[in-house]
Amino acid sequence: MDRILDRFFRYSAHGSSLRTEIIAGLSTFAAMAYIICIQPALFSGRMTGAPTGMSFDALVTTTCIASAFGTILMGVLANYPVGLAPGMGTNFFVMFSVMGACAAVTGGKVGDPVVWQTAMGVVLISGILFLVISFTKLRKMMLHSLSPSLKFAIVTGIGLFIAMVGLKNGGIIAVEAGQYTLKTAVTDTPSLIFFSGLLVIAALQYYKIKGSVLIGILFSALVAFLCGKISFSGLIGLPADPSELIGKADVTMVLRHILELLPLIFICFFMDMFDTMGTIIGVATSAKLLNENNEIERIKRIFAADATATVAGALCGQSTVTSYLESAAGAEAGGKTGLVAVVIGICFLLAMFFAPVITAVAGYPPVTSGALVAVGVMMMRSVSEIQWNDCTESVPAFLIFAGIPFSSSIIGGISIGIIIYPFLKVCCGKIREVSWFAWISAVLLILYLILLNGK
């Protein structure tokens, strides 16, 4: 078996071994497995208290299926040690911005099947667009067409938004008279569960323990169990039937409202492309996989695998499935080939059979609240990459990452910064720094705000 696997993945040629690749795969899975709890809770509406009409149990199954498919495809097609799953950040964008827009254009409300099915249509089209562009020179042009400061601002803004949801679910802040306020009863059970999970995650991250977020969620679940807030019906069970979610993406409805939804399609597409590029560069650097020219080999295959995973994810009722930066955990453990990804994918498939535990853990929002804040902290690291000494970069960037949480709208915050960006550059005599895509983005978002105004 060792020889057969080595012949296909060539891990010996990369200075690795079967044992190292397996350990690396397990390390990466432990680091990213928290998504199995968070994604179903978010998309079913249990996390927010606003049911979406999507079954929590079916989402557990499709989260594992979509993640396994994308990850194994990355391993077999591109031979890269990268895990894929519904991306943190893009999932919140789809949930809070895409679904809201789909409700507006279809005349439905969040909870109606037409809304989430149309949202999945948006994700599906963005994945197809990514797949097509992956094989063209346009991909490279687009990667360099949006200001890095704006890219990092989007990441940090969504990170703040995710943290805000975590603080609300953890009972730390509350909505009173339409405003967020600090709750004084921080000794309530939800707050104790929140603090216990966040402290464990932060301490484990300080000591560089792999899987810190997942361990923190499990510790919070233990505290919730001891407080009588959750109960376990078992450890292992058959996966829930995913048929009510699979193949329900409504492309026809998206095309019917293409003018209003086109900006959202492009944002989903670009978030996926930028996430993939950043992750691949990080993992390739950690695993020393860059060639002599510091270039990433098989880049077309990597992007094709990621884009195909997004398409498959949308067909499974999932938000954008993308490469995970947590894959660096496997690279640090010595993993260098696609066998690492195959191991991660197998772990996702096995996780489906632990649905009773996942249901209990993710069904009570305070359990994952500390993890959401921890993820927000990790995403905030990008703020240091913004060009703060250049007001033509820093002002639009600030409007994005401050506008997202302050307006409680991801698309709203993104729109403010991207619309003002090219006009500010012109006013400051820097029109040559404005790419063609910056103008297209501004026009599309202006069109989006005009068409959806009042809906």
Image (cartoon, rainbow, N blue to C red):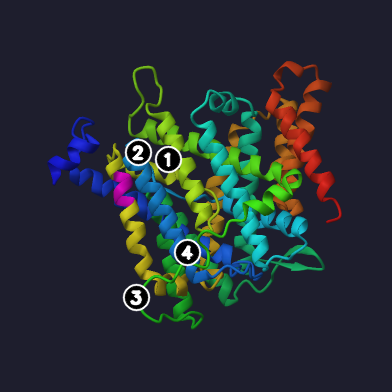
Disc nearest the viewer among 3 and 1: 1
Residue carrying label 3: 235
Q: Quadrant of residue 166?
A: bottom right
Q: Earlier in the sequence, mark 1 or mark 2?
A: 2
Mark 3–mark 1 Cα distance, whole angstroms, equals 33 Å
Residue carrying label 2: 77
Amino acid carrying mark 1 in the image: Ala
Give the SS element for disc 2.
Answer: helix
Please name the residue shown 61% across and 44% down the image: 268
Q: Does the residue at mark 1 contact the one at mark 2 (Cβ under 8 Å)?
A: yes
Q: Judge the density around disc 1: few (<14), some (14-19), many (≥20) Cα neighbours within 10 Å.
A: many
Quadrant that contains the C terminus? bottom right
Percent x, y of residue 138: 57, 25
Percent x, y of residue 104: 77, 57
Give the SS element for disc 3.
Answer: loop
Comparing 437 with 33, the one in front is 437
Q: Earlier in the sequence, mark 3 or mark 2?
A: 2
Q: Judge the density around disc 4: few (<14), some (14-19), many (≥20) Cα neighbours within 10 Å.
A: many
Relative to 196, residue 234 above or below: below
Percent x, y of residue 392: 75, 26
Residue carrying label 4: 37
Residue carrying label 1: 305
Relative to 11, 268 lies left or right: right
Q: Does the residue at mark 3 contact the one at mark 1 (Cβ under 8 Å)?
A: no
Comparing 263 with 204, the one in front is 263
Residues drawn in magenta: 340-344
Mark 3–mark 4 Cα distance, whole angstroms, equals 15 Å
Relative to 151, 347 lies left or right: left
